[in-house]
Amino acid sequence: MPLTRTLITAEYAVLRLPLTVLGDRVVARYLEEDSKLRLGFEKTLGTLDTTVGRLVGDPGLTRRGAHLSHRAGMLEKAVVLEEKAQVRKQEADASLQQAKAVAEHKRTAAQQRAEDDLKALRRDKEAQKQAVAAKAEAKAKARSQAARDNASVKAESIEQRTEQQLQRVDERARTQASKPAAQLQEAAAMAADARKERAAADRLSELAGQEKARRKG
């Protein structure tokens, strides 16, 4: 029985030799340690070594196969974890970019709203300013018109008084002119008074003319 095991072990070593050479000179040299092709190759060798070692009762071959399989399995898990981590990283980066885009959109929208509110406030202030100016201008025009109307009334009143005084002077003059010669001296005095009245009336007329000129101006 030991001879049979020895023969089987020797035959397996001969059969495994090309795989060993392939693993040492090609797989280990040209493939990355965590390459799926290399890990699959090493896992297969480890399984073969473990199986044959158990069949022939070779603890060393079994341990070698188990170690090779375990190492390949651990690296395979590491690769899977790295791939998951890369996927999560990409998803996190995408979420971060999306969050940044949303934040930028909100910031731009808020800035635009602030600018619109500022423009609206400026328009309201300008409208209020124009309304106040228009109201002040209307009041000024009303006061100016009232002043012109008042001046016109005053001028008309002066003209009426002047006309009345002139009429009284004319009436007095006609009355005095019809009196007898004995009253000439009195008439002369009355004429002098009349001239004074006429001068006063002329003065009133002149004032009325000035008032009219000022109103037209």
Image (cartoon, rainbow, N blue to C red):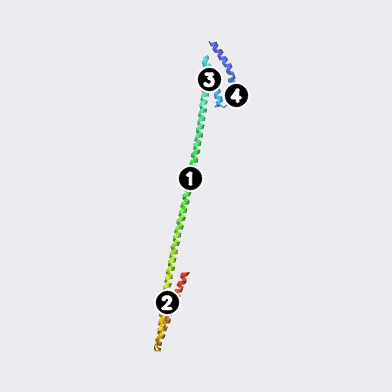
Q: Which residue in the protein does label 3 denote?
A: 47
Q: CA distance from mark 1 to mark 4?
A: 61 Å
Task: Determine the residue located farthest toward the bottom in the rendered image.
Answer: 182
Tag 1 and tag 4, C-beta contact below 8 Å = no
Amino acid at pointer 3: Thr
Q: Which comes before the other along the chain, label 1 or label 2?
A: 1
Of pointers 2 and 4, the one earlier in the residue sequence: 4
The residue under the point 59% across, 22% down is 22
Q: Can residue 60 be seen here?
A: no
| Residue neighbourhood size for the residue with mark 3, other residues' Cα within 10 Å, grouped as few (<14), some (14–19), many (≥20) | some
Image point (55%, 14%), residue name: 8
The one of 16 and 138 positioned closer to us in this rendering: 138
Tags 1 and 2 in contact by the CB under 8 Å rule?
no
Mark 1 or mark 4, whichever is nearer to me: 1
Asked if 132 appears above or below 51 in the picture, the reply is below
Amino acid type shown at disc 1: Ala
Instruction: Name the residue: 48% across, 49% down.
Output: 116
Residue 84: percent from left, percent from top = 50, 30
Specify whether 152 is left or right of 79.
left
Q: In front: mark 3 or mark 4?
A: 3
Q: Amino acid at mark 4?
A: Val
Q: What residue did someone put label 4 on?
A: 26
Can you tell which quarter of the image residue 149 is in?
bottom left
Distance from disc 2 to disc 3, alpha carbons, whole Å, reads: 143 Å
Q: Amino acid at mark 2?
A: Glu
Nearest the viewer among 67 and 96 is 96
Residue 163: mark: 2
- Residue that numbered label 1 is attached to: 109
Tag 1–tag 3 contact (CB < 8 Å): no
